[in-house]
Image: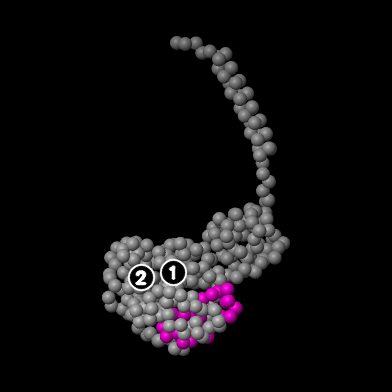
């Protein structure tokens, strides 16, 4: 048996002890030199936020938003998820004005549900708009139209999107935070984020003209120009057979341009009554899906 070398063990223990003390000292000095002050109010404000980290406020999440509030770069109202009471609470805590930000919501440029838009083929595959779009653009006759397989509903963490009985997404504006997830997921690019004050809306993205457009979808914009003629100068223009609204002139907008639209493709989004079509728009009472 080998004799235990207590001297070597003692030297090793002493060395490790000294090394530990030296490293502790280095860390203490580094902490003192590299320490960055963080306002304790950031934690408090973060606790008052919804913690959805949706990014609709323009920051990467709730904590960066709290930091921006402390720095005065944003106002509490920039959080579109918080209720008015919660926004006021944050403003009161920070001693700042709550701010006044126009709510922004997701809008869909399509009204072609299964009862008004034709299908050119039956799709039997993965229940996903993105997957269906990879097969010759999808089964819908209108290659610009909503495919109705609910990718947008699935990606919305706040349950602000639901599918109606005709396979079209419906946005709950009270829940929508303008996070843009639906914008990113839609393979047809039909969603866009709009200020809720944009009441005049073209619910179509079809670029075909006249009867050709209407033969594929009964509520398609036909490029007839009636809305452009009835609108204030320059508010609506027809480009590529589709009505386009110049929202820089939104103060001129009214329901007047929708009244003579024959298909109801251009609508007025009433704050109380919801989607309103013009008096000359065709009335469709069909509930069942159109045959192939």
* Residue 143 circle label: 2
> Would you say residue 218 is visible in this rendering?
no
Front residue of 139 and 244: 244
Q: How many marks on residues?
A: 2
Mark sitting earlier along the chain (2/1): 2
In the image, is 260 to the left or to the right of 95?
A: left
Q: Residue at x 37, y 85 (%)?
A: 285
Q: Position of residue 3 (x, y in %)?
A: 50, 11
* Alpha carbon distance from label 2 to label 1: 12 Å
In percent of width and height, residue 156 lies at 46, 64
The quarter in which the N terminus is drawn is top left
Is residue 98 at all visible to an observer of this figure?
A: yes
Q: Residue at horizontal 32%, vertical 73%?
A: 141
Q: Does 248 appear in magenta? A: yes
Q: Residues within 10 Å of mark 1 (few under 14, many from 20)?
A: many
Q: Is residue 223 left or right of residue 231?
A: left
Specify the quadrant that holds the C terminus: bottom left
Label 1 element class:
loop
Q: Residue furthest bottom?
A: 279
Residue that numbered label 1 is attached to:
190
Nearer mark to the viewer, of 2 and 1: 2
Residue 23 vertical placement versus 61 (above, below): above
Region of the chain picked out in magenta, as a range: 245-269
Quadrant in the picture for residue 168: bottom left
Label 2 crowd bin: few (<14), some (14–19), many (20+), radius 10 Å: some
Q: Position of residue 204 (x, y in %)?
A: 43, 75
* SS assignment at label 2: loop
Vertically, is 102 above or below 35? Answer: below
């Amino acid at each position: 048996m080998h004799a235990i070398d207590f001297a070597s063990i003692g030297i090793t223990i002493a060395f490790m002890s000294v090394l530990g003390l030296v490293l502790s000292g280095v860390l203490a000095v580094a902490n003192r030199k590299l320490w960055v002050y963080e306002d304790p109010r950031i934690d408090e404000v973060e606790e008052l936020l919804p913690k959805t980290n949706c990014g609709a406020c323009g920051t990467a999440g709730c904590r960066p938003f709290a930091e921006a509030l402390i720095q005065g770069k944003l106002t509490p109202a920039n959080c579109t998820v918080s209720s008015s009471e919660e926004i006021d609470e944050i403003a009161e805590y920070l001693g700042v004005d709550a701010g006044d930000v126009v709510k922004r919501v997701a809008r869909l440029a399509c009204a072609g549900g299964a009862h008004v838009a034709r299908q050119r083929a039956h799709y039997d595959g993965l229940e996903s708009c993105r997957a269906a779009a990879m097969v010759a653009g999808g089964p819908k006759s209108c290659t610009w139209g909503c495919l109705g397989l609910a990718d947008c509903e699935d990606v919305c963490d706040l349950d602000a999107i639901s599918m109606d009985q005709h396979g079209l997404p419906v946005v709950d504006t009270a829940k929508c935070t303008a996070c843009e997830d639906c914008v990113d997921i839609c393979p047809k690019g039909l969603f866009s984020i709009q200020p809720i004050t944009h009441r005049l809306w073209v619910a179509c993205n079809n670029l075909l003209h006249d009867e050709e457009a209407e033969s594929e979808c009964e509520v398609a914009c036909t490029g007839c120009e009636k809305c452009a003629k009835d609108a204030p100068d320059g508010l609506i223009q027809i480009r590529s057979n589709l009505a386009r609204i110049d929202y820089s002139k939104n103060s001129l907008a009214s329901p007047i341009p929708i009244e003579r639209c024959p298909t109801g493709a251009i609508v007025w989004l009433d704050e109380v009554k919801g989607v309103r079509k013009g008096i000359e728009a065709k009335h469709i009472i069909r509930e069942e899906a159109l045959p192939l």
